[in-house]
Every structure is written in C-alpha cells, then in structure tokens.
Image (spheres, grey):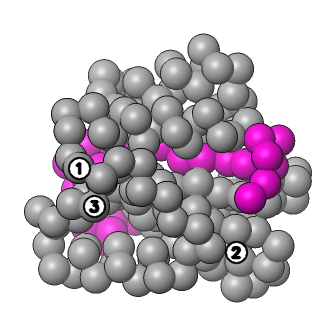
Amino acid sequence: MHGKPVSCCFTGHRPAKLPWGENESDPRCLRLKERLREVIERAAEDGYTHFICGMAEGCDLYCAEAVLALRERRGGVTLEAAIPCPTQPDSWSAAQRERYRRIIERCDYETMVQERYSRDCMQRRNRYMVDRSSLLIAVHDGLPGGTRYTIEYALRRGVSIIDVPIEE
C-alpha cells in the first residue's frame, strides 16, 4: 500500500445530520455529491492515488462511490474501506446494508480496525484513516461530533483539509 503523501481520507455527516436526511434525490444532496466528485478528481490530479473511507452512512458512502466512479473512468486510484468493527452496518436498512456490501466488494483494500464494537471504535477508525493520510476531505456543519473530532485530530497531525460545505 502507498505511503502518506498519496493518501486521502474522508469525514462527513451521517444522514441524520444532513438537512435532506436520507433523501438523496434532494437537489442539495445531488449538488454535494457533484462537489465531492470534483474535489476527489482534483485530489487525484494532485497526486492522491489512495483513498480511505470509513464506510459510515451518508457522506462516507457518497465519497466511496465517487472514488469508485473515478477509478472506472480513469484508473490509477485505489479505495480502502476502513471498517470500525464487523457490526458497523447491522442496524442499517436492508437497502443501505446492500449498498455497503456492494461498495466493500469493489474496494481494493479492506481494513478491520477492531474485531468488536466498543464506544470508541469509530474514533479509532477515524484516527487510523488520518494517521495514514496527508489530505482530509471533510463535509461538516461546524457542530460537535465525530466529524469535528476527526477534523481537529487532522489539524493536530498537520494533515491538509479540504472543507466541502453543506447547503442548508
């Protein structure tokens, strides 16, 4: 696997914190996905070839799908699923679990951060991703939570951050 200078990871909100919730046909969601595609493509043009995704619902899966589409279009990029624990998708809807499974099947690498759920496994997953990246693409509304924790951790680690704003 590649070293730090070519790796990029993602952080962003789950549907409950997005203004459109789970309605991905909402024009604001479609525009966010388009901006993410553009930012990811630009990162690849700048030499980032390895992308690490935490595989959470919402923004993580949007980013994973954008990387997979980029890989199909032009190749030269890899996607790693950084999975916090084996039970990550267990409480999701059947459709979201199937989406998760399809994405993981297409990943180049799969890393299980720990074998059992614990209160801090999501943060451990986030630190794993940031520690292996030199760029973080973040979709954040400024509120406290896992996304802000990941951004603050990346800042302390000297990782570059591209902020992709959420439309209200």
Question: Label 1 belongs to which residue?
Answer: 116
- Return the x and y of residue 17 as percentages of the image width and height: 25, 43
- As measured in the structure, the alpha-carbon distance from the residue carrying label 2 to the one carrying label 1 is 32 Å
Question: Label 2 belongs to which residue?
Answer: 70
Question: Label 3 belongs to which residue?
Answer: 86
Q: Amino acid at mark 1?
A: Arg
- Return the x and y of residue 88 as percentages of the image width and height: 25, 58
Q: Residue furthest top?
A: 156
Tell me which label, 2 or 1, sits earlier in the chain. 2
Residues at badges 3 and 1 in contact (C-beta under 8 Å)?
A: yes
Of residues 129 and 30, the one drawn nearer to the viewer in this rendering: 129
Quadrant of the rendered image containing residue 37: bottom right
- As measured in the structure, the alpha-carbon distance from the residue carrying label 3 to the one carrying label 2 is 27 Å
Question: Of helix, strand and loop, which one carries label 2?
Answer: helix
Q: Is residue 123 above or below residue 143?
A: below
Task: Identify which residue is drawn at 78% across, 54% down.
Answer: 2
Magenta segment: does it hold 11?
A: yes
Task: Locate the N terminus by quadrant.
Answer: bottom right
- Return the x and y of residue 63 as percentages of the image width and height: 53, 61
Task: Identify which residue is drawn at 56% across, 74% down.
Answer: 107
Magenta range:
1-27
Of residues 90 and 70, the one drawn nearer to the viewer in this rendering: 90
Q: Residue furthest right?
A: 46
Of the two numbered discs 2 and 1 in the rendering, the one whose residue sits closer to the viewer: 1
Q: Amino acid at mark 2?
A: Leu
Task: Identify which residue is drawn at 71% across, 77% down.
Answer: 71
Question: Of helix, strand and loop, which one carries label 3?
Answer: loop
